[in-house]
Image (tube, coloured by chain):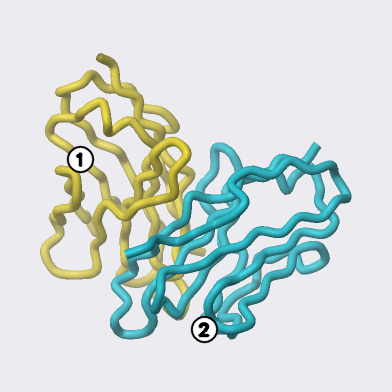
Chain colours: A yellow, B cyan
Amino acid sequence: AQSVTQPDIHITVSEGASLELRCNYSYGATPYLFWYVQSPGQGLQLLLKYFSGDTLVQGIKGFEAEFKRSQSSFNLRKPSVHWSDAAEYFCAVGAGRSNYQLIWGAGTKLIIKP
Amino acid sequence: EAGVAQSPRYKIIEKRQSVAFWCNPISGHATLYWYQQILGQGPKLLIQFQNNGVVDDSQLPKDRFSAERLKGVDSTLKIQPAKLEDSAVYLCASSLQGGGNTGELFFGEGSRLTVL
């Protein structure tokens, strides 16, 4: 069965420091992979997605993610975080007959230290 | 462009009462989803509509949950009777249909339900 694991429930990073959020997936075929962000009291917003091609994808707000098939990973990175990046981040994999039927990870809450 | 609209934002009810949530997707989006997000967990798909037809409702607890999208536009999710474990945020999302679908779901702000 398809699954998504985000090993870190919380991550605390100082403002200006670099960030990496981990995501591992289990999926039998070539996955469609997504990162969404959920700010407090808000709905989820798509940060970036990987369907095929270049394994390093760029997203909004300065985020990027790298697809590593050998490690079944799709980690999210940002070189320098801002206080406004404090939010919950969800990794998801496309599954089912339509690849946009998503299986979600449990999320990683990002806390920014001033 | 208007986003996905949901109401109410917050609802508190007692167990065994009923509640209904409303969602109006982005204009032109044929696919509509209802997700349940329990605190500390990722969203769980309850039901997916394509226009006014159901694509997937395999995780909808049909003994107490129902959803409809009669005219292929807005949708209502109902819970009757509610249980304590139904306390969650109910998220509505929409997306474009078919080959043009980029996999991007557009979410509303959610309806937070507390069952006492």
- Considering only vertical position in the picture, is B57 above or below A73? below
Q: The C terminus of chain B lies in which quarter of the figure?
A: top right
Residue at image position (44%, 57%) is B107
**x, y percent for residue B13:** 79, 43
User: Residue B48: which quarter of the image?
Assistant: bottom right
- Considering only vertical position in the picture, is B25 above or below B108? below
Q: Are marks 2 and 1 on the same chain?
A: no
Q: Which mark is residue A77?
A: 1
Q: Is residue A27 left or right of residue A1?
A: left
Camera-nearest label, 2 or 1: 2
User: Residue A102: which quarter of the image?
Assistant: bottom left
Q: Which mark is residue A39?
A: none
**x, y percent for residue B93:** 47, 63
Residue at image position (25%, 14%) is A114
**x, y percent for residue A93:** 38, 61
Mark 2 surroundings within 10 Å by alpha-carbon count, few (fewer than 14), some (14 through 19), many (20 or more)? some
What is the C-alpha distance between the residues marked 2 and 1? 37 Å
Mark 1 surroundings within 10 Å by alpha-carbon count, few (fewer than 14), some (14 through 19), many (20 or more)? some
Write down the residue under mark 2. Answer: B51
Q: Are marks 2 and 1 in contact (CB under 8 Å)?
A: no
Q: Is residue A102 left or right of residue B72?
A: left
Provide the chain ID for the residue under circle 1.
Answer: A
User: Residue B10: which quarter of the image?
Assistant: top right
Q: Secondary structure at mark 1?
A: strand
Determine the residue located farthest toward the right in the rendered image. B16
Give the amino acid type for the residue marked by disc 2 in the picture.
Asn
Give the amino acid type for the residue marked by disc 1 in the picture.
Arg
